[in-house]
Image (spheres, grey):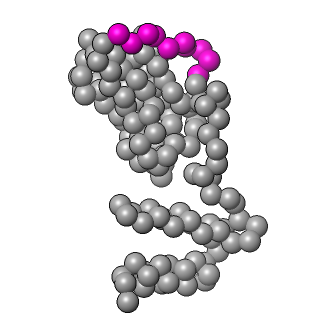
Amino acid sequence: MNDIVTDTRALLRLFRQSGYGDIHLRTDDYELFVARPGGGANPLRAPIDRAAAVPESAPPIEATGAEQVIAAPHIASFVFALAVGSTVAAGDAVARIELLGEPIDLFAEQPGMITEVLVQPGALIEYAVPLVRLLAA
């Protein structure tokens, strides 16, 4: 029998015996979300309201050169990003996310300026979601 099927069956048996309301499991080629009756709907499948995701305090700066997009390396909570218009050097932290209570800084690969912050602090972010746009210097 396929290992993934065997592993899934074992996980579901453990889930039934646990007090968890729901679980979400993801590997490189497999994703599973399970909830008990009355448990929550999968929050990662909720529609994204793009208007609410863009901070109102700082309008985007027009990009005219090469652009770097800083994307989420994990499913996490977005903590903060540097302000639009901030100048950064290669290797500078430009944003922070939190995964299981642990802060993770995200770094610029090249020098430049923050042109847009795409996510509100506190937002639950999916893997690979763009968080910050950086215009190359």
Image spot of residue 97 (x, y percent): 45, 39
| Identity of the residue furthest to the bottom in this view | 1
**Residue 115 forms part of the magenta stretch:** no
Q: Residue at x 31, y 30 (%)?
A: 107
Q: Which of the 4 image quadrants contains residue 66?
A: top left
Residue 52: x %, y % from top left: 65, 29
Residue 86 can be seen, yes or no: no
Up-down: is 30 above or below 95?
below
Is residue 14 found left or right of 90 in the rendered image? right
Taking the view exactly as shown, the residue that stands out farthest to the front is: 64
Secondary structure predominantly adopted by residues drawn in magenta: loop
Q: Residue at x 37, y 31 (%)?
A: 70
Lateral position of residue 32 relative to residue 6, left or right: right
**Residue 62 visible:** yes
Instruction: Write the start and end of the magenta stretch as one range.
Output: 55-64
Query: 23 and 49: which one is in front?
Result: 49
Q: Is residue 82 left or right of residue 64?
A: right
Asked whether 60 falls inside the magenta stretch, the response is yes
x, y percentage for residue 137? 26, 11
Q: Nearer the viewer, residue 65 or 111?
A: 65
Examine the rendered structure and indicate whether residue 101 appears above or below residue 133.
below
Residue 116 left/right relative to 104: right
* Residue located 50% across and 14% down the image: 60
